[in-house]
Amino acid sequence: MLEFPRIRQELIQENEYMTLTPLLLHGAEKAEARAMKAEWRIPSLKGELRYWYRALYAPRFDKTTSLAAAEGKLLGTAGSGGNEAQKSNVVLSEGLKKLRAEDGKKGPYIELYPPKQQATYGFEPKKLFSVQFAYQDEATRSIFEPLLRWFELIGGIGQRSRRGNGAFQATTDTFDSIEEYLDEIELNLQKIGIRYERNGQMLKTKEHSTLQHSVPTWKQTTVGCLFKSEVEARKSIIENAYQGYMYDGKKEVSGGIRPRFASPYHFTVRRIGQHFAVILTEVSYTLSKDTRTFDAAKVDVYHFLKGGKS
């Protein structure tokens, strides 16, 4: 067990995970050196936790500055604009079972559209890794653990994680059915204090955020089709959903660079029983003044989740 100075032993925990799909992570080196090495890094995980903290807790705040202050208290901040840097109340560290650099090999991991494969460095499925979490106090733990649990249930990490890569699962999570998986998400939403409704295989928020135009806010999570392998699940995401909303002027829902904005869709994969489920989480964004193409694309995306072709 790693040492965390000044933190009581009962406030330290270690969680073990397994990669379900290729985990595409680069190291800390620059340029060519970075592209030649896959490396598990805590900042990648912490960045994802920051994103989901904003998406889940935005409805509780009426100002983005207040949301940022609460996030900084929990996860730390580098400091800017005259504000001092703040240490995180949560300490994260690699655990005893690490993803080693030599495990990050180059291979045809990514399915792209048009249908082809791109080789890149990453960690293969079925790799174990663990992370240790240490909390300053019980109050910090009560806030952080539901956030972490949310990320364990619907999150992805690394490159192209929005399209099914970078999926992982806690080794203690062995869901026998979609209903059991959704029940666990429901339980976690209740711990966070988010009002929601359940409709079939979809969980949808009943909260309203005044920050939704400037901060991504969780909208709904839906479980789609089950597949025999993670490869089939990822290919279905690319060949159906991605292809469907790249045509006919619908490309804004895939994100953009000019102007820069992120896609409202987060696809990932989770193991349920002996199969692999496609999970879609949607956040609220203002994509453009004309949302007609977005609405049309959305129909395609959810049609795909039910097993249709885009």
Image (tube, rainbow, N blue to C red):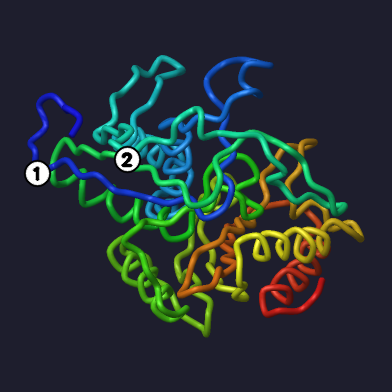
Disc number placed over residue 10 in the picture, else none: 1
- Helix, strand or loop at mark 1: helix
- Helix, strand or loop at mark 2: strand
In percent of the image, x 56 and y 70: which residue is there?
Answer: 277
* Quadrant in the rendering for residue 295: bottom right
Q: Is residue 224 left or right of residue 301?
A: left
Residue neighbourhood size for the residue with mark 1, other residues' Cα within 10 Å, grouped as few (<14), some (14–19), many (≥20): few
Which percent across, then down, holds residue 206?
46, 71
The first of marks 2 and 1 along the sequence is 1
Q: Is residue 125 above or below residue 93?
A: below
Q: Is residue 106 left or right of residue 215?
A: right
Q: Is residue 142 above or below residue 195?
A: above
Q: Nearer the viewer, residue 98 or 151?
A: 98
In the orientation shown, which residue stands out farthest toward the right?
248
Which percent across, then down, holds residue 32?
68, 16
The kind of residue on which mark 2 rests is Val
In percent of the image, x 62 and y 76: which residue is there?
Answer: 225
Q: Is residue 81 above or below residue 74?
A: above
The kind of residue on which mark 1 rests is Glu
The N terminus: image quadrant:
top left
Q: Please give the residue where the numbered disc 2 appears in the rendered image.
A: 131
* Quadrant in the rendering for residue 129: top left
In percent of the image, x 66 and y 24: which residue is there?
Answer: 35
Q: Is residue 267 above or below residue 49?
A: below
Q: Is residue 84 left or right of residue 36?
A: left
In percent of the image, x 45 and y 75: which residue is there?
Answer: 273
In the orientation shown, which residue stands out farthest toward the bottom?
200
Q: Nearer the viewer, residue 142 or 61?
A: 142
Label 2 or label 1, whichever lies nearer to me, is 2
Which percent across, then down, holds residue 158?
56, 40
